[in-house]
Structures are given as C-alpha cells and as structure tokens.
Amino acid sequence: MADEGETPFCLDDEQRARVGDCLRKGGLSLPPDRLKRLIAGIEASIAHFRATPPDGSFRDAHDALRALWALAEDDDPPIGQLKARLARLPAAARESIGRRVPTVMLRLLGIDLGGPAGELPERAFDRFLRWTKTPEAVQLPEPPPPLPKAMAEKLPALTGGAPVSLPPLVTALRALSSNGARPVQGRSRGGGKRSGPRWEPVIMGEVRGAGTARHRGGRPANERHRQLVMHLACDWLNATGEPPKPGRSDNTGFGDLVHSVFAWLGLPDDSATYALRHYWRISKAVKARETLKDFLRRHSKEL
C-alpha cells in the first residue's frame, strides 16, 4: 500500500476501463469487490513507484544505514532527525529494513504491523514508516514500579546511573539499522602503529573497515521499473487468484496492464518490455530451482 507521505495516484474513469480491458484480454472477469481491490493495488503500486527515491549504489545505502545507526545509538537520540533520515533512505536501504522489520517488531517490541505473509520488503518498509508517524512509536514505556529505598540508593553505583527508557521507535531503529557489531582493527598510524580497535555495525552483511567491500557499483538504473512489475504482478495475483501469464508484449492481459501503467507514468516506450523480460527471466529461474525435498531425495540416493 502507498505510504501516507506519498502523493496518491487515483485512476480516472478511462484508466479504470483500461484495467477491465486487460482483464478481459486475460480471459478474466472479476466481481466488483475484487475489481476494486485490483484497482486499489495498482494505485498503491504506482504511488510507491513515484515516491521511491533513486536507487543509488550499495555504498550509498550502507552509508545511510550507518548514519541512521549512529544517530539511534546516541545517548539522547533526536526523534525528528531519525524520522527524517528514515524517510530519505535509498531504495536498497529500505529493502534491507523491510526484509527484517516484521520479525524484529514482533519479537523485540511485540508489535504486529499487520502485513501479510511474504509481503514485499518495500511494502513492509512503507508499513513501518506509517507506524513511525503514530503516537505509539514515540510514547515512552510505562516506568517500572519504584524500588525499595535501600536498593535505589545502590542502583547508581551498580549500574552507573538510572536505567533510561527509550521510545519504541529508537529501540526498533537500533535493531533494524544493523545486524549487530564486530570489532575492527584500528587504522594505521605509520611506523607499525595502529589506533585502538573499535566496534563497527554489521550493515547489509558488511562491516566498514573490515575489508569486505564486495559491492562496487550501483544497481541497474531500471531496477525501479522491475520492482514496479513485481508489485503489479502481486496486485494481479491477489485480486484474481491466478498468477499472470508470461509475455513481454501487450498481447497478454497482464502485459497490457504493465504497458498501460508505464504509459500512464510517462516512462520510455521500451521500458515496459525490458522490465517484463527481466521479470519473467527471474520467475523462470526461481521455478527451475530444485526444491529442498528433491535435493534431499537425490542426495540420499547418492549416499
């Protein structure tokens, strides 16, 4: 679904009629409620596409998440700045958070964001972003009951100070912006000397300064187009109950829908064809993968 901060996109009467034409071309007829669901999904997918920032490089995403992590780990994290940085994250950083956010929110805070099983990371992130704008996200937890006077007097000496309560938003971002931390060797100071080791967050599988930078360039420039096709395919499946039929032209119902949506967005004429080609190539590769059951059966025979 589209985020509250995204500019809504509403299909006009001509575009809604076009959706009906695409369904008929695919040999499908939907009752009014499911047709409404399909149109709402298409509008949300278009709104998400329009609001998604440029992809950028792996380094851009890594740096943005590291900056978010450093800000969240501050002794007094600025809520406004955290929200602003979160809203400006590159697409790859949003996906990184979106893949983990349902599990982290439920296990860490007991908060169910309400997303369906298998929800795309981009939409899971949008759902999380909407939650950050609710009062629940910044409300401090209820303070624990007061300790006995004798224990309270010893508490600062035992813990270094009174425990600090954090808003759920800060707790969530501390966990979502990284996958833990690792010690990193200090920088060389010349003459065989190094500065002291430091802890660095593990972000998107890599640690700055640990010599693991495997990602050099950015993602393909048309990755947003490919994601749009994936979102539209999910919308089609959720509304019709049937996966779209393969085809990169507008000869199929789903292909016609993709070409129509790309035209409504003013995208280049050939961009829908290329995005569909990539989508079906990936789908074919996924279907061709050996299942775990077949893998175990084959290897048991070899043994």
Image (cartoon, rainbow, N blue to C red):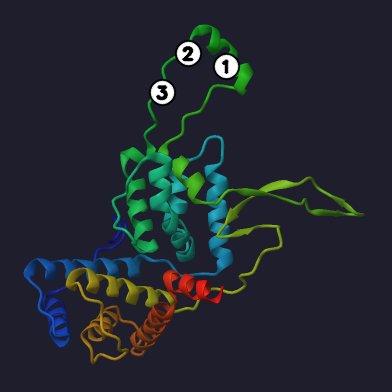
The numbered mark, 1 or 2, whose residue comes first in the sequence reads 2
How many residues crowd around disc 3 within 10 Å: few (fewer than 14), some, or many (20 or more)? Answer: few
Q: Quadrant of residue 291?
A: bottom left
Vertical position of residue 39 compared to residue 132: above or below:
below
Name the amino acid type tagged 1.
Leu
For the view shown, which residue lies furthest in the left direction?
32
How many residues crowd around disc 1 within 10 Å: few (fewer than 14), some, or many (20 or more)? Answer: some
For the view shown, which residue lies furthest in the right direction?
191
Residue 181 percent location from the top left of the image: 62, 48
Residue under pointer 1: 155
Name the amino acid type tagged 3.
Pro
Vertical position of residue 273 compared to residue 181: above or below:
below
> What's the residue at 49%, 78% (across, down)?
220
The numbered mark, 3 or 1, whose residue comes first in the sequence reads 3
Residue under pointer 3: 143
Q: Quadrant of the C terminus?
A: bottom right
Q: Secondary structure at mark 1?
A: helix
Label 3 to label 2: alpha-carbon separation: 11 Å
Residue 239 percent location from the top left of the image: 18, 70
> What's the residue at 20%, 85% (across, down)?
253
Whether tag 1 and tag 2 are in contact, CB under 8 A, the answer is yes
Q: Which mark is residue 147?
A: 2
How many residues crowd around disc 2 within 10 Å: few (fewer than 14), some, or many (20 or more)? Answer: few
Q: Quadrant of the N terminus?
A: bottom left
Vertical position of residue 170 compared to residue 223: above or below:
above
Label 1 to label 2: alpha-carbon separation: 9 Å
Q: Secondary structure at mark 2?
A: loop
Name the amino acid type tagged 2.
Leu
Label 3 to label 1: alpha-carbon separation: 16 Å
Q: Secondary structure at mark 3?
A: loop
For the view shown, which residue lies furthest in the top direction?
150
